[in-house]
Image (cartoon, helix red, strand yellow):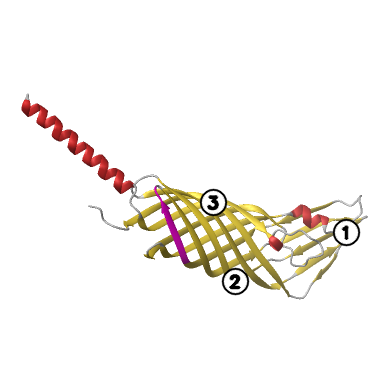
């Protein structure tokens, strides 16, 4: 009976010690992360503007954002990170038609490809742990690649059929951004998070052309350039893999 009691006691102590170790490790602060997120892309400023009097209005609508990031704390709460993000935004074709002068009896349609914006940025971040939660803040800079979408409109002025097509173009520019993340630890090496980020880049799109058809008459513009400011807010959620303990309790 005494041996059985000792055996049960030892087993209980071992189980308690294991649970305590697991609890401590699941709360252990980590130095590095690799994260994947997806969510909404929300254009702001001139990127969202539909003003017919603004030649830099991009008429972008809401879209999707996907991002991956990795970071490592190098000194206390401060670390360095790299982040890549892809945005795909629609074009407000209704605004394109609103900017077109036409009679009430004229019927026009508009089509457009999507805006595509990709950024790769790096910079410092600070991570503030609060138990299972942590808050990250970051300031980033890097490069952006944007694709100005092709657009077309077709309809009639009275009895005359007309159409206008504008070619798109690619451009690269300096990108600046920043954001916040709220993380929640699920276990020893995993977490989920919510992100809110802002990024901006000033592009110059070259070699653009516009082609107009007026009945059987075709006219094409000379190549021209257009300046566009792309500023966007992304709100996303995802998960992260955490690695390397900040300190070793065992």
- Quarter where residue 81 is shown: bottom left
Pick the front one: 127 or 58: 127
Q: CA distance from mark 2 to mark 3?
A: 24 Å
* Residue at (42% x, 64% y) in the render: 78
Q: Position of residue 123 (x, y in %)?
A: 48, 68
SS class, disc 1:
loop
Residue under label 1: 101
Disc ID at residue 172: 2
Number of other residues with Cα within 10 Å of mark 2, as a class: few under 14, some 14 to 19, many 20 or more: some
SS class, disc 3:
strand
SS class, disc 2:
strand
In which quadrant will I find the N terminus? top left
In the image, farthest residue toward the top = 1
Judge left or right: residue 77 versus residue 22. Answer: right
Badge 2 vs badge 3, beta-carbon distance below 8 Å: no
Residue 173 in the magenta stretch? The answer is: no
Residue 126 in the magenta stretch? The answer is: yes
Q: Nearer the viewer, mark 2 or mark 3?
A: 3
Pick the front one: 84 or 106: 84
Q: Position of residue 106 (x, y in %)?
A: 89, 52
Q: Position of residue 190 (x, y in %)?
A: 38, 49
Q: Main secondary structure of the magenta part?
A: strand
Between discs 3 and 1, the one toward the N terminus: 1
Q: Nearer the viewer, mark 3 or mark 1?
A: 3
Q: Is residue 168 above or below residue 36?
A: below
Magenta range is 124-131
Disc ID at residue 236: 3
Pick the front one: 149 or 248: 248
């Amino acid at each position: 009976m005494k041996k059985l009691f000792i055996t049960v006691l030892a087993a209980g102590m071992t189980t308690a010690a294991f649970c305590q170790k697991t609890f401590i490790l699941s709360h252990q602060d980590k130095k590095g992360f690799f994260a994947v997120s997806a969510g909404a892309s929300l254009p702001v400023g001139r990127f969202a503007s539909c003003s017919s009097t603004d030649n830099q209005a991009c008429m972008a609508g809401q879209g999707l954002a996907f991002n991956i990031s990795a970071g490592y704390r190098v000194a206390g709460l401060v670390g360095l990170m790299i982040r890549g993000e892809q945005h795909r935004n629609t074009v407000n074709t209704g605004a394109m038609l609103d900017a077109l002068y036409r009679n009430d009896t004229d019927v026009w349609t508009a089509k457009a490809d999507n805006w595509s914006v990709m950024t790769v940025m790096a910079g410092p971040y600070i991570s503030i742990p609060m138990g299972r939660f942590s808050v990250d803040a970051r300031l980033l800079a890097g490069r952006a690649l944007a694709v100005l979408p092709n657009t077309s409109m077709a309809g009639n002025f009275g009895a005359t059929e007309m159409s206008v097509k504008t070619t798109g173009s690619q451009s690269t520019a300096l990108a600046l951004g920043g954001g916040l993340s709220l993380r929640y630890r699920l276990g020893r090496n995993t977490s989920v998070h919510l992100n809110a980020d802002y990024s901006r880049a000033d592009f110059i799109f070259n070699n653009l052309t516009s082609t107009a058809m007026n009945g059987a008459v075709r006219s094409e513009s000379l190549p021209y350039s257009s300046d566009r400011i792309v500023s966007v807010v992304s709100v996303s959620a995802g998960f992260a893999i955490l690695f390397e303990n900040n300190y070793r309790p065992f």
